[in-house]
Amino acid sequence: MLKFLLSDNESLAKYMHGKFASFEDVKRRMLLKSRAQNPAIPDHLYRLDQQEAFLGIESLSEILTKGFERIAFTHLELNANRVYVKPEQQNHWQEIITFIPPLLLQCAFLHKYMYTNYSNCKTDESERHKYFKDYILPNTRYTAIPHARIPQLEHYVKEQNGLHDLHMHLNGALETDQVWQDYLFNPLGIYKDLKKGFMIPKVKEQMEQESHLLEPLNYVTLLKSAQKLRDYFFYYLYPHNNHKYDNYDKKSLLREFISNDSDISGSYKHPFLSLITDADDYFCLMSVEGLMYILMLDEISKTKNEFLANLFHFYLLILGLTNRLLVQQTHQNGFEQFQKHTLNGLRENSENIFLRRYYQMHGNDLSYIRFLEGRFSPKDSQKTMITFLRSIFKGWDKMIQDISLDYNNELESVRMKPQLRLIAHFIKKADNKPNDFIRHKVLRYDIFQRAKVLALLIKNHPDYCKKIVAIDAAASEFDAPPEVFAPVFRKMRRAGIKHFTYHAGEDFYHILSGIRAIYEAIVFCDLQKGDRIGHATASGLSPMQWKNNIGCKLLVKQGDYLDDLIFTYHLIIKRKIESLNSILPFIINKVSELSFLIYNKHFPVAILEKAWLMRQCCPVHALESDRENLILNNIYDEEEWCFIINNGFVNSRNELKNDKAYKLLKTYHNLNNRSGFDKIISIDPFDILKAEDVELLQLELLHEMTKREIVIETLPTSNVRIGFHKNYSTYHLLNWVKWQEEGKSIPPIVVGSDDTGIFATNIYNEYANIYCMLLYTHNMPHSKVMKIIKRLDEDSRIYKFE
């Protein structure tokens, strides 16, 4: 229940209206927040939970001191001067820090555990500097996210000189406690970003979902309030004469803090920085914030000053609101919730410089990463692309230079410097301006232009050949299918790119659609040995678990469901799945029914199957009969003109006009038929294929991937938040492990962190989450867990893109 302390919008609104939140207010709201997570549980059980949570807590000051301490001491432990997550709590800790940023919890822990040994820290400068240097800085220098102390994993990481992170997006990387410093330093920048974000419907939806307070000006006023509160905390702890706060009473002070008469463009400096240094040390601001937390918690703990507790509570609620905009919460399930974080642009100003991101993901000891594949979106001009790439590598080179200075001569010979490679990911976008004859025409032209720029860059600047090692397609699968990207993937392979990966099967309406997306990405985009699929959740998720999440009825587009059944028919026939032959007549009947509803004509299933497979052809080329007209088009490509013939769909272009599948392909693309395709229908998700049948399809797909040596990129925290999981206990990696032990064909699996800021993680913690899930939830012995960990990292070493 206490984890909701920073999710209390009602108390935040009260402060904004010049009123104080009481202990009873907060206690009541924690019960209601907890109850909202599962309203099926009766109140009398929640009241027992409330009694347990608030045992020994009788005031707001005790909520902030004892409350945060309880959470911290439940999850954290100390070894020497370093804070670690208790291994048995690692998976739960990953959820807790979606509610409360980890810096605050670390400081609540350090205050209670260590502050007694530095009793004069507040007033004695030398003692304060020593405490800061010995305890705060080592735990918060680059990241505030601690990791579990797992001797076997720590030894392995040290022995291997770090881990391989093979799926990490360079945007969405900075953690909340870093970004928070930037917000208070420059409220004007976030105001502009928030105004821009409000123009995007999904972003506005996110804002209204998380708080009714989030009009851009209201939020910036809150940031200015946080600035003033910081200043007051410093004044209170270190009073000086003739300060403007000297003559304020409590109500006047609160009114001063919430007034919006301040200039949001003015410069601002963290007042507590002066306790540590006279310099504007940008890189230690997160640690300075931690010092402020500890000093405030100590003061409130000693004095029981309820007024000061109220103001600190107000400050932390503003931080909590910010955190919900930056980190995907446990209640924000699914890809669209994740996408709102990527669209809101609230990290843009903070992520202009790459160096902080690299330090953060490499850990406070600069030991997490051995090999990083960073993903970026290619630009639409060569000049913009070069400028962007230079900034990426400038930050990386600076980090390598800095950490090389820290290596002594003995370590230099054995400690490998981390390596960075880049993957250009094309962005899936919705078809908001539909063309009459070609689906996703605007997007196809856009990614073709970006691919052309990227190909020219690689040709004209050979040094980038070694740095940009692969191509990807990312973002929402609901917006664009693999067929849109297939021509561009082929173009980039011809341009000399050797490696390819594709986000597929991450989120879906029907689990069959997720399985189909993985298959289409492999076949349509011609993925080859050593290429990879990002996420591939649909190939491992338990079908029954999925059904239990979505219920007995499912709304789908009837065209998508038709495609799912055509794909199922295709896989059963191609893979000769004899145990599913008995359902083929039911599939064929349903396919016939749906195709008539969509196209107003019955088609044999073989024609529908061929037309579906023909979607991998570029429609700009395949549907154009006049080559000369096409040559005038800047998207013309000779290989794509010949693709439909060279891949055996027809023997010559003259045959196209009489080919039934080709005619159906044109019908599929024609705008007049899309309303039937997009019509929403309600189905029983297991009306034809039962859960065990879907599992057979999963295994056949995995066998096909194994045969082709297509690798899976699994991303633990991302998959738990976006996939159909409540927590790590059902994380589908376990199914892949179990099936492999049963002798099933499972392809190689590698690990990534995805978006380290949005998911509040890093590659070390992703391995720790896997380790602790297997050990503590599924009771595997240490030796077996380490064998799995080593296999994952070994696959990452083998299948990294170089």
Image (cartoon, helix red, strand yellow):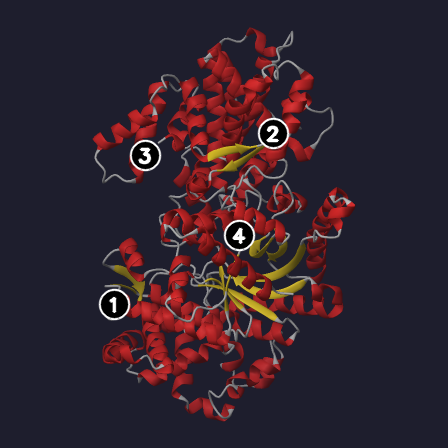
- Between 14 and 746, the residue placed more toward the observer is 746
Q: Secondary structure at mark 1?
A: loop
Could you say where residue 558 lies in the image, as x and y percent from the top left?
30, 68
Q: Is residue 517 visible?
A: yes
Identify the amino acid type marked 1: Lys
SS of the residue at dot 4?
loop
| Front: mark 3 or 4 | 4
Marks 1/2 in contact by CB < 8 Å: the verdict is no
Residue that numbered label 4 is attached to: 753
Q: Could you tell me residue 601's position as x and y percent?
A: 29, 81
Q: Is 633 located above or below residue 48 in the figure?
A: below
Lower position in the chain sequence, tag 4 or tag 1: 1
The label number, if any, that marks residue 690 in the structure image: 1
Mark nearer the viewer, 1 or 2: 2
Q: Circles 4 and 1: CB distance less than 8 Å?
A: no
Where residue 704 appears, as percent x and y from the top left, is 43, 75
Mark 3 sits on what residue?
A: 34
Q: Amino acid at mark 2?
A: Ile
Give the residue type at disc 3: Ser
